[in-house]
Amino acid sequence: MHYATWTKRARALFIDSIWWTVIVLFVPLGPSLDDLLTASDPGTSLLVWAGLAQCIPIVVTGVMWAVWGTSPGKRATRIRIVDADTGRPMTVKQAMLRTLGYLLTFAICGAGFLWVLFNSRKQALHDRLANTVVIDGLA
């Protein structure tokens, strides 16, 4: 297997970030800002909904991984996610574990991505948790 480079993965993440931003900023998810500000505890309500809004694109990405083994950014950069041991498409369970790991990676300010630089199979934290690798080429 030819593992995708850190720079190629970073380009894919950048492309995915564009559509994530569109979803978070322009698709109405949850209550309006006016409703949040007039709630009994506006600070808590705003933090809860802001956190949920950040999780929604990651969960949608996890569904794409489970169905296609890739995301729009990975597809554009011609890389895909596979099982680390067999090179076969990842399972739904692996996609779910990878999604949870992705949430963890973002929760620690993206530090989980740095593992790619030091791991021989170029695995990030979420790849290690799910036993997946990102490889060059689309099937």
Image (cartoon, rainbow, N blue to C red):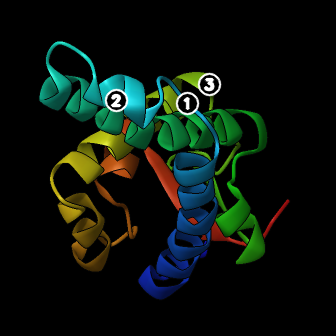
Q: Which mark is nearer the camera, 1 or 3?
A: 1
Tag 1 residue: 29
Residue 19 position, x and y percent, is 64, 60
Amino acid under label 2? Trp
Q: Secondary structure at mark 3?
A: helix
Spatial CA distance of label 3 from label 2 is: 27 Å
Q: Is residue 74 left or right of residue 4?
A: right
Spatial CA distance of label 2 from label 1 is: 9 Å
Q: Secondary structure at mark 2?
A: helix
Tag 2 residue: 49
Residue that appears at 76% across and 74% down:
76
The residue sitting at the right extreme is 139
Tell me: residue 120, above or below residue 57.
below
Tag 3 residue: 92
**Closer to us: 64 or 128:** 64
Amino acid under label 1? Leu
Quadrant in which the C terminus is drawn: bottom right
Residue that appears at 59% across and 72% down:
12
Residue 80 position, x and y percent, is 67, 60
Q: Which one is earlier in the sequence, the residue at label 1 or at label 3? A: 1
- The quarter of the displayed image where residue 114 is located: bottom left
Dot 3 alpha-carbon crowd within 10 angstroms: few under 14, some 14 to 19, many 20 or more: some
- The quarter of the displayed image where residue 109 is located: bottom left
Q: Which mark is nearer the camera, 3 or 2?
A: 2
Q: Are marks 2 and 1 in contact (CB under 8 Å)?
A: yes
Q: Secondary structure at mark 1?
A: loop
Spatial CA distance of label 1 from label 3 is: 26 Å
Q: Which one is earlier in the sequence, the residue at label 2 or at label 1? A: 1
Residue that appears at 30% across and 65% down:
113
Amino acid under label 3? Val
